[in-house]
Image: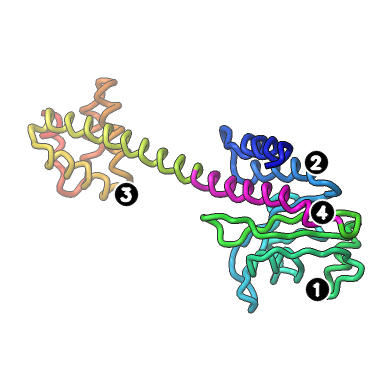
């Protein structure tokens, strides 16, 4: 492999590596900025993803999530249907689309006007391979015609591949962090409920199941979470205010022990 391409590949791995609080949009912004500086003749780079279903085309809505600062060649989720052009086709058919010169382009009626608004003449759009998103498109634009030849394709493919990996990794990372958060929350909840049950078992001379049933019935009666009841009881025990807390929770709670029993 060409040394320049190999060096770039290593750099792209670092650019695409997730950092603390990164999301896919942040990583993609780093990639498009590097692509613009690296690919010869490239004046603008964008990444566009499918965001839902719309219209009769079966394509769904598209939104440009990186490189959207040039609105005439960017897609917006607010569009009733994606405007016809190489980005929409590359995303829909999963095939590259190249425009050598927008001034002579006839496949999409409105596209030459969009390119002219942005000052571009040539474009290359290709699908990004991802596992977790059905349609992602990497697009390059140049102010010169015939800019994106086969010679530049190796570099473009490197960026597209890394873009797909970045999107998948960011999605997995986000899912993993959410899962860890849920597990951590569950462990804390279990610990608090366990402490509260122990307090009730000692104070009311009941078993584990009965203690949890008391917490559950109080929760249902007052329409709050079991964890909140358990946490209040645990804090009250630490403060020496357990009798007052039990009296408050047991008041008018159907099926709960009487206040005298709670204080005994």
Relative depth, front residue between 31 and 79: 31
> On screen, 89 above or below 184?
below
Callouts 4 and 1 close, C-beta under 8 Å: no
Residue 257 x %, y % = 13, 40
Q: Is residue 104 visible?
A: yes
Kindly give the residue lying farthest to the front in the view shown. Answer: 1
Residue hosting label 1:
108
Stretch in magenta: 147-172
Q: CA distance from mark 4 to mark 2?
A: 17 Å
Q: Residue at x 22, y 41 (%)?
A: 215
Relative depth, front residue between 167 and 228: 167
Viewed as shown, does residue 11 lie left or right of 174?
Answer: right
The verdict on residue 40 being magenta is no
Residue hosting label 3:
223
Residue hosting label 2:
37
Which is nearer the N-term, disc 4 or disc 1? 4
Which quadrant is home to the N terminus? top right
Q: Residue at x 90, y 59 (%)?
A: 145
């Amino acid at each position: 492999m060409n040394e320049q391409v190999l060096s770039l590949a290593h750099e792209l791995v670092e650019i695409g590596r997730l950092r603390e609080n990164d999301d896919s949009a942040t990583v993609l912004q780093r990639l498009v900025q590097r692509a613009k500086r690296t690919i010869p003749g490239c004046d603008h780079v964008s990444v566009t993803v499918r965001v839902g279903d719309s219209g009769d085309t079966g394509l769904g809505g598209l939104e440009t999530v990186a490189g959207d600062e040039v609105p005439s060649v960017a897609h917006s989720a607010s569009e009733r249907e994606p405007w016809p052009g190489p980005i929409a086709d590359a995303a829909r058919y999963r095939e590259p689309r190249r425009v050598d010169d927008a001034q002579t382009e006839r496949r999409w009626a409105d596209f030459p006007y969009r390119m002219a608004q942005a000052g571009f003449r040539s474009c290359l759009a290709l699908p990004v391979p991802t596992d977790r998103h059905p349609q992602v498109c990497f697009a390059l634009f140049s102010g010169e015609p015939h800019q994106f030849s086969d010679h530049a394709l190796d570099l473009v493919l490197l960026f597209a591949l890394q873009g797909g990996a970045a999107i998948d990794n960011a999605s997995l990372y986000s899912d993993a962090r959410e899962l860890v958060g849920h597990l951590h929350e569950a462990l804390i909840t279990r610990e608090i409920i366990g402490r509260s049950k122990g307090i009730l078992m000692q104070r009311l001379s009941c078993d584990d199941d009965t203690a949890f049933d008391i917490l559950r019935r109080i929760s249902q009666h007052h329409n709050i979470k079991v964890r909140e009841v358990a946490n209040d009881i645990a804090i009250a025990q630490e403060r020496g205010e357990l009798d007052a807390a039990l009296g408050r929770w047991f008041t008018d709670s159907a099926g709960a022990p009487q206040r005298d029993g709670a204080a005994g």
